Image (tube, rainbow, N blue to C red):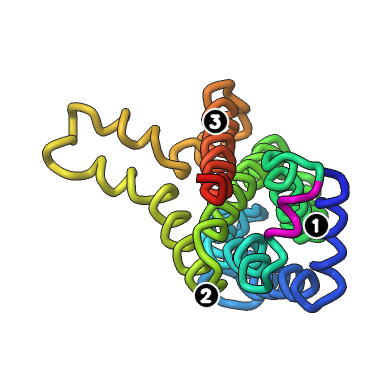
């Protein structure tokens, strides 16, 4: 798995993909946090990073599929998938290596946003008047969210040899798992009966919970289970070649 991991990392940074992902994410977040009037911290009057953690999931819905769309689709299109699967490694190791490489790339894009934290920390009145616990919890939530979206994106890429199709499918699945259950819970037939249960199937419900700064075991189990389900589905998708 280590060889697959480093192969993917080298592939990201030997082309423009890795630099574009990090650059686009930081540019969008910087504009939203400091420039655009409706979102700017400077115009809001409060020293917090709510805009970052509120907008980042939406950006991830498009950014992460752009990262993962090539993981298997490109291998199939180039005809190198057969060479890859004939090596003395299991399908789980192949999927795990590609998953971890994509997740690390997203985490690398998050690390520079620590500058935003220190800036907002200094802007507080008095200095340091900031909910650091909530912010740390939100970062943990973003990493779990990124892991879930990466697992979904890798699964979508395993279904096709067309990178555009993989991107569109991954974006749709990320949106569906993130928001669809929350929207379904608002239907009159569920309100007051099972709306909370239905919401709990969506990522947004658990991401919001983690963002409060409290790491609940149920939220951790949810994210780990969701990632495991989509990685298992990816392994099953790769196994189709043996059928």
Q: In the image, is 59 to the left or to the right of 118? A: left
Nearer-N-terminus badge (3/2): 2
Q: Is residue 33 above or below residue 125?
A: below
Instruction: Determine which residue is flagged by label 1.
Output: 108
Instruction: Determine which residue is flagged by label 2.
Output: 164
Q: Residue furthest top?
A: 217
Q: CA distance from mark 2 to mark 1?
A: 24 Å
Q: Is residue 197 above or below residue 134?
A: above
Q: Which structural element holds mark 2?
A: helix
Q: Is residue 124 visible?
A: no
Q: Is residue 137 visible?
A: yes
Q: Position of residue 242 (x, y in %)?
A: 56, 46
Q: CA distance from mark 3 to mark 2?
A: 27 Å
Q: In the image, is 173 to the left or to the right of 191? A: right
Residue depth check, mark 2 versus mark 1: number of the one nearer the observer: 2
The circle drawn on residue 234 is none
Residues at badges 2 and 1 in contact (C-beta under 8 Å)? no
The circle drawn on residue 225 is 3
Q: Residue furthest left?
A: 189
- From which residue to which does the magenta span run? 82-87
Query: 211 or 105, which lies in front?
Result: 105
């Amino acid at each position: 798995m280590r060889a697959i991991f480093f192969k993917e990392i080298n592939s990201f940074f030997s082309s423009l993909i890795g630099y574009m992902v990090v650059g686009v994410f930081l540019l969008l977040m910087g504009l939203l946090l400091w420039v655009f009037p409706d979102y700017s911290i400077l115009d809001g009057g409060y020293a917090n990073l709510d805009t970052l953690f509120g907008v980042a999931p939406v950006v991830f819905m498009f950014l992460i599929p752009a990262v993962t769309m090539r993981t298997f689709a490109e291998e199939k299109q180039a005809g190198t998938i057969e060479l890859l699967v004939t090596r003395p490694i299991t399908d789980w190791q192949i999927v795990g290596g590609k998953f971890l490489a994509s997740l690390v790339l997203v985490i690398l894009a998050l690390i520079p946003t620590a500058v935003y934290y220190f800036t907002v920390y200094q802007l507080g009145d008095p200095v340091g008047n900031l909910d650091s616990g909530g912010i740390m919890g939100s970062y943990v939530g973003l990493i779990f969210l990124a892991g879930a979206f990466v697992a979904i994106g890798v699964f979508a890429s395993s279904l096709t040899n067309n990178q555009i199709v993989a991107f569109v499918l991954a974006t749709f699945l990320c949106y569906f798992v993130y928001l669809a259950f929350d929207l379904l819970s608002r239907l009159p037939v569920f309100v007051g009966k099972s709306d909370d249960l239905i919401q709990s199937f969506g990522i947004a419900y658990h991401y919001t919970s983690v963002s409060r700064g409290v790491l609940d075991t149920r939220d951790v189990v949810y994210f780990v289970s969701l990632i495991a389900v989509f990685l298992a589905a990816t392994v099953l998708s790769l196994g189709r070649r043996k059928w």
